[in-house]
Image (cartoon, rainbow, N blue to C red):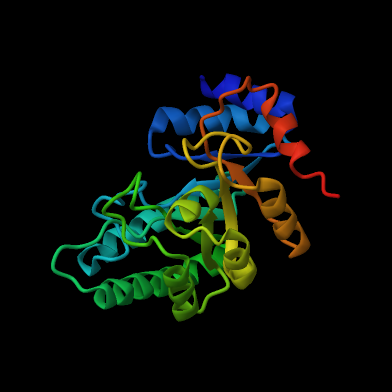
Amino acid sequence: MPIPDALAKLNDLGYDAYEMFNWRDQKTLDTFLVEAPKYPNLACATLVSNKGVTASECGLVNPKERDQFLKEMEAAIAVANKFNCKRLVTLTGNDVPGMSGEAMMASAVAGLKAAAPMLEKNGITAVIEVLNTYVDHPKYNLYRVGDAAKLIDAVGSPNVKILFDIYHVQIMEGNLIPLIRQNIKRIGHFHIGDNPGRHQPGTGEINYRNVFKAIYDLGYDGYAALEYGPTIPLTLDPINERNLTIFE
């Protein structure tokens, strides 16, 4: 769907935010700059800081890529400020052949510590995404919530947090509600999708009503972004989500 139509549809359906992934394409960025101000009730919830899942040539786990990572982060912050966007989806990148897990963790910590001052200065939070290696991203480095928590704690900045993708975590670990409860102060953003298939909540094995209630009860007040392929008409999708947030 073209960007102007997508933003109009989101606004019409009552959503309050969108995510922006391909801002490095100048035509895409220019379109958002023209169209997004037409919808003042639609916030830019996130944009991607370092070129997507593989974080090609600008990942966190390879120290040789740190300078480029920091350049990408600086560029992403500049664009985020144009949209008053306060979260940057950040990827560790894939495992580096020949490097130990400890060395890759140390590199990621060092890279995020180097980025933290510019994040804090601009009031923007990097949310580090945990992905699954079983189905979608077999070489990705950060696939356990516990490792993400260690990373966040080692960096020690309030502007570096976890992006808790419920679909990915369900595949790798399950145990969703305890993991969310244990890490809620470290979590800066959620992604939503059911498993298997990565469709809307209610199509798979995850009890989203219970998950949503746990998040609500913990006082989380950030965004939960819908990152899936719906199998129902778009006009029904927000109704489906809202029904799952009605708790007894």
Whether residue 39 is visible here, answered yes or no, is no
Q: Residue at x 35, y 45 (%)?
A: 135
Q: Quadrant of residue 86?
A: bottom right
In this rendering, the answer to whether 233 lies above or below 104 is above
With respect to residue 46, does 175 lie above or below?
A: below
Left of 36 or right of it: where is 55? left
130 relative position to 210: left or right: left
Along the line of sight, which residue is nearer the eye, 3 or 92? 92
Q: Which residue: 62% across, 32% down?
A: 36
Above or below: residue 68 compared with residue 3:
below
The relative height of residue 45 versus residue 144 in the rendered view (above or below) is above
Kindly give the residue lying farthest to the front in the view shown: 205
Residue 157: x and y in percent read 53, 75
- Locate residue 178, reporting x and y percent: 61, 67
| Location of residue 183 in the rendering, given as x and y in whole percent from the top left corner | 59, 70
Q: Residue at the spot x=18%, y=71% of the render? A: 99
Nearest the viewer among 19 and 189 is 189
Residue at image location 60% in from the left, 27% down from the top: 35
Image quadrant of residue 189?
bottom right
**Can you name the residue that lies furthest to the right here?**
248
Residue 24 can be seen, yes or no: yes
The mark total stands at 0
Picture quadrant where residue 239 is located: top right
Judging depth in this view, the residue of 14 and 198 nearest the camera is 198
Percent of width and height locating residue 80: 53, 49
Q: Nearer the viewer, residue 110 or 81?
A: 110
